[in-house]
Image: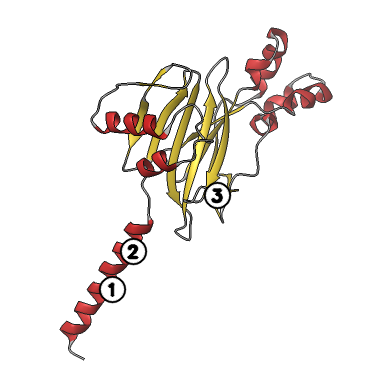
Amino acid sequence: MNNNIILTRTLLFAFLCTISFSANAQKVGDLFLSMPDKIVPTLSKQQRFEMLEYSKLNRRDSVKNKFNEYLSIQHYDSINQLITFNTTKNNLTEIKVFEMEDATPVVAIINTVLQPVRLSTIQFYHLNWQPMTLFSDIPTAKQWLISENTENADIDLDWLNKHLGNSYLSFTFSKEKPAIEVENHLVDFLSIEDKKIIANLLSNKPLIYKLSHKQFVISE
Protein backbone atom coordinates (compact mmCIF):
# COMPACT_ATOMS: atom_id res chain seq x y z
CA MET A 1 0.00 0.00 0.00
CA ASN A 2 1.27 3.45 -0.89
CA ASN A 3 2.92 5.20 2.08
CA ASN A 4 1.00 8.40 1.36
CA ILE A 5 -2.29 6.51 1.57
CA ILE A 6 -1.27 4.96 4.90
CA LEU A 7 -0.28 8.36 6.26
CA THR A 8 -3.54 9.91 5.05
CA ARG A 9 -5.61 7.17 6.70
CA THR A 10 -3.64 7.51 9.94
CA LEU A 11 -4.19 11.26 10.05
CA LEU A 12 -7.87 10.83 9.22
CA PHE A 13 -8.30 8.32 12.05
CA ALA A 14 -6.58 10.66 14.51
CA PHE A 15 -8.79 13.51 13.35
CA LEU A 16 -11.96 11.45 13.78
CA CYS A 17 -10.86 10.40 17.26
CA THR A 18 -10.33 14.03 18.16
CA ILE A 19 -13.81 14.92 16.89
CA SER A 20 -15.32 12.03 18.82
CA PHE A 21 -13.58 13.09 22.04
CA SER A 22 -14.62 16.71 21.59
CA ALA A 23 -18.20 15.66 21.03
CA ASN A 24 -18.28 13.58 24.21
CA ALA A 25 -16.28 15.98 26.37
CA GLN A 26 -18.13 18.71 28.19
CA LYS A 27 -16.63 21.95 29.35
CA VAL A 28 -17.16 23.33 32.82
CA GLY A 29 -19.34 26.12 31.43
CA ASP A 30 -21.69 23.60 29.82
CA LEU A 31 -21.88 21.58 33.05
CA PHE A 32 -22.53 24.74 35.06
CA LEU A 33 -25.68 25.16 32.96
CA SER A 34 -26.73 21.51 32.76
CA MET A 35 -26.41 20.61 36.44
CA PRO A 36 -29.69 19.56 38.08
CA ASP A 37 -31.50 22.27 40.01
CA LYS A 38 -31.36 20.15 43.18
CA ILE A 39 -27.58 20.69 43.28
CA VAL A 40 -27.99 24.48 43.26
CA PRO A 41 -31.58 25.05 44.37
CA THR A 42 -31.11 28.79 44.88
CA LEU A 43 -30.24 29.47 41.23
CA SER A 44 -32.28 28.57 38.15
CA LYS A 45 -30.71 27.51 34.86
CA GLN A 46 -31.63 30.90 33.37
CA GLN A 47 -29.87 32.72 36.21
CA ARG A 48 -26.78 30.54 35.78
CA PHE A 49 -26.83 31.29 32.06
CA GLU A 50 -26.88 35.02 32.74
CA MET A 51 -24.06 34.72 35.29
CA LEU A 52 -21.93 32.78 32.82
CA GLU A 53 -22.52 35.22 29.97
CA TYR A 54 -21.59 38.18 32.19
CA SER A 55 -18.42 36.37 33.25
CA LYS A 56 -17.41 35.61 29.65
CA LEU A 57 -17.66 39.34 28.97
CA ASN A 58 -15.49 40.08 32.03
CA ARG A 59 -18.43 41.77 33.69
CA ARG A 60 -19.29 41.36 37.38
CA ASP A 61 -22.99 41.98 36.86
CA SER A 62 -25.04 40.02 39.34
CA VAL A 63 -28.32 38.14 39.32
CA LYS A 64 -30.87 37.66 42.08
CA ASN A 65 -31.15 34.23 43.64
CA LYS A 66 -34.37 32.86 45.17
CA PHE A 67 -33.61 34.77 48.39
CA ASN A 68 -33.29 38.07 46.47
CA GLU A 69 -29.53 38.14 47.10
CA TYR A 70 -27.33 39.55 44.35
CA LEU A 71 -24.74 36.98 43.21
CA SER A 72 -22.12 36.60 40.49
CA ILE A 73 -19.41 34.24 39.29
CA GLN A 74 -16.23 34.91 41.27
CA HIS A 75 -13.82 33.05 39.02
CA TYR A 76 -14.16 31.40 35.60
CA ASP A 77 -11.16 29.48 34.25
CA SER A 78 -11.98 27.75 30.97
CA ILE A 79 -8.42 26.44 30.63
CA ASN A 80 -8.29 24.66 33.99
CA GLN A 81 -12.03 23.91 33.81
CA LEU A 82 -12.99 25.65 37.05
CA ILE A 83 -15.89 27.93 38.04
CA THR A 84 -16.28 29.51 41.48
CA PHE A 85 -19.54 31.25 42.34
CA ASN A 86 -21.85 32.12 45.23
CA THR A 87 -25.18 30.32 45.61
CA THR A 88 -26.01 32.55 48.59
CA LYS A 89 -24.07 35.33 50.30
CA ASN A 90 -22.81 32.77 52.80
CA ASN A 91 -22.15 29.86 50.45
CA LEU A 92 -19.38 29.43 47.89
CA THR A 93 -19.48 26.68 45.27
CA GLU A 94 -16.56 25.43 43.17
CA ILE A 95 -17.06 23.24 40.10
CA LYS A 96 -14.12 21.53 38.42
CA VAL A 97 -13.88 19.07 35.55
CA PHE A 98 -10.91 16.71 35.41
CA GLU A 99 -9.93 13.29 34.08
CA MET A 100 -9.07 10.17 36.02
CA GLU A 101 -6.07 8.02 35.10
CA ASP A 102 -8.11 6.13 32.52
CA ALA A 103 -9.29 9.43 30.95
CA THR A 104 -12.80 9.12 32.45
CA PRO A 105 -14.13 12.67 32.89
CA VAL A 106 -15.35 13.66 36.35
CA VAL A 107 -17.27 16.65 37.70
CA ALA A 108 -16.27 17.67 41.24
CA ILE A 109 -18.31 20.12 43.31
CA ILE A 110 -17.25 21.72 46.59
CA ASN A 111 -19.85 23.61 48.62
CA THR A 112 -18.51 25.80 51.41
CA VAL A 113 -20.36 27.67 54.13
CA LEU A 114 -18.32 30.84 54.71
CA GLN A 115 -19.46 32.09 58.13
CA PRO A 116 -18.96 31.81 61.04
CA VAL A 117 -16.28 29.29 59.95
CA ARG A 118 -15.54 27.80 56.54
CA LEU A 119 -17.06 24.30 56.38
CA SER A 120 -17.26 22.24 53.19
CA THR A 121 -18.80 19.22 51.57
CA ILE A 122 -17.51 17.58 48.40
CA GLN A 123 -19.28 15.46 45.80
CA PHE A 124 -18.25 13.83 42.51
CA TYR A 125 -20.39 13.09 39.46
CA HIS A 126 -20.25 11.43 36.07
CA LEU A 127 -21.05 13.73 33.14
CA ASN A 128 -24.67 12.53 33.29
CA TRP A 129 -24.81 13.77 36.90
CA GLN A 130 -24.89 10.33 38.46
CA PRO A 131 -22.99 10.45 41.79
CA MET A 132 -19.68 8.66 42.22
CA THR A 133 -17.36 8.15 45.20
CA LEU A 134 -13.74 9.28 44.93
CA PHE A 135 -13.13 10.73 48.39
CA SER A 136 -13.97 8.28 51.16
CA ASP A 137 -11.14 8.85 53.65
CA ILE A 138 -12.47 12.00 55.36
CA PRO A 139 -9.72 13.11 57.78
CA THR A 140 -10.15 13.93 61.46
CA ALA A 141 -8.24 16.55 63.41
CA LYS A 142 -5.83 13.84 64.61
CA GLN A 143 -4.20 13.90 61.19
CA TRP A 144 -2.99 17.45 61.84
CA LEU A 145 -1.27 16.51 65.11
CA ILE A 146 2.40 17.45 65.42
CA SER A 147 3.67 14.30 67.13
CA GLU A 148 6.75 15.84 68.78
CA ASN A 149 4.67 18.64 70.31
CA THR A 150 2.18 16.12 71.67
CA GLU A 151 4.90 13.94 73.17
CA ASN A 152 6.40 16.91 75.01
CA ALA A 153 3.08 18.27 76.27
CA ASP A 154 1.80 17.55 79.75
CA ILE A 155 -1.72 16.78 78.67
CA ASP A 156 -4.49 14.25 79.31
CA LEU A 157 -4.48 12.13 76.15
CA ASP A 158 -8.05 10.92 76.66
CA TRP A 159 -9.21 14.54 76.87
CA LEU A 160 -7.20 15.39 73.75
CA ASN A 161 -8.47 12.43 71.73
CA LYS A 162 -12.04 13.32 72.61
CA HIS A 163 -11.59 16.77 71.08
CA LEU A 164 -9.64 15.54 68.06
CA GLY A 165 -12.34 13.07 67.11
CA ASN A 166 -14.31 15.91 65.53
CA SER A 167 -13.84 17.19 61.99
CA TYR A 168 -14.54 20.77 60.91
CA LEU A 169 -13.09 20.86 57.42
CA SER A 170 -12.99 23.07 54.37
CA PHE A 171 -11.96 21.95 50.88
CA THR A 172 -10.61 23.69 47.84
CA PHE A 173 -9.14 22.59 44.53
CA SER A 174 -5.36 22.75 44.48
CA LYS A 175 -3.38 24.32 41.68
CA GLU A 176 -1.86 20.87 41.23
CA LYS A 177 -3.97 18.70 38.96
CA PRO A 178 -6.01 16.94 40.14
CA ALA A 179 -5.60 17.55 43.87
CA ILE A 180 -7.69 18.79 46.79
CA GLU A 181 -6.52 20.81 49.78
CA VAL A 182 -8.22 20.17 53.12
CA GLU A 183 -7.99 22.60 56.03
CA ASN A 184 -8.85 21.86 59.65
CA HIS A 185 -10.93 24.43 61.60
CA LEU A 186 -11.29 22.57 64.88
CA VAL A 187 -9.65 25.30 66.96
CA ASP A 188 -12.29 27.80 65.85
CA PHE A 189 -14.90 25.77 67.72
CA LEU A 190 -12.98 25.48 71.00
CA SER A 191 -13.24 27.56 74.14
CA ILE A 192 -10.49 30.11 74.73
CA GLU A 193 -8.89 27.85 77.35
CA ASP A 194 -8.94 24.72 75.18
CA LYS A 195 -7.74 26.65 72.16
CA LYS A 196 -4.59 27.76 73.99
CA ILE A 197 -3.70 24.13 74.68
CA ILE A 198 -4.66 22.44 71.42
CA ALA A 199 -3.67 25.08 68.87
CA ASN A 200 0.04 24.51 69.58
CA LEU A 201 -0.35 20.78 68.95
CA LEU A 202 -1.84 21.07 65.47
CA SER A 203 -0.28 21.98 62.14
CA ASN A 204 -1.99 24.80 60.27
CA LYS A 205 -0.95 23.41 56.88
CA PRO A 206 -3.63 21.88 54.64
CA LEU A 207 -3.59 18.18 53.84
CA ILE A 208 -3.13 17.50 50.13
CA TYR A 209 -5.18 14.72 48.56
CA LYS A 210 -4.13 13.45 45.14
CA LEU A 211 -5.89 11.11 42.76
CA SER A 212 -4.57 7.57 42.81
CA HIS A 213 -6.33 4.47 41.52
CA LYS A 214 -9.69 6.23 41.29
CA GLN A 215 -9.54 7.56 44.85
CA PHE A 216 -8.27 10.77 46.40
CA VAL A 217 -5.67 9.80 49.02
CA ILE A 218 -3.38 11.83 51.25
CA SER A 219 -0.15 12.75 49.49
CA GLU A 220 2.92 11.68 51.46
Render colour scheme: secondary structure
Mark earlier in primary sequence (3, 2)? 2
* Residue 80 position by quadrant: top left
| Quarter that holds the C terminus | top right
Q: Amino acid at mark 2?
A: Ser
Are the two marked residues, 3 and 2, in contact with CB atoms closer than 8 angstroms? Answer: no
Local SS, label 1: helix
Q: Which label lies toward us, 1 or 3?
A: 3
Q: Which mark is residue 130?
A: 3
Furthest toward the bottom, the residue is 1
Q: Residue at x 60, y 44 (%)?
A: 135
Which residue is tagged 1? 13
* Disc 1: CA contacts within 10 A as few (<14), some (14-19) or many (>=20): few
* Nearer to me, 5 or 90: 90
Q: Residue at x 49, y 26 (%)?
A: 42
Which residue is tagged 2? 20
* Nearer to me, 175 or 50: 50
Q: Amino acid at mark 1?
A: Phe
Does residue 162 appear to the left or right of 141 in the view shown? right
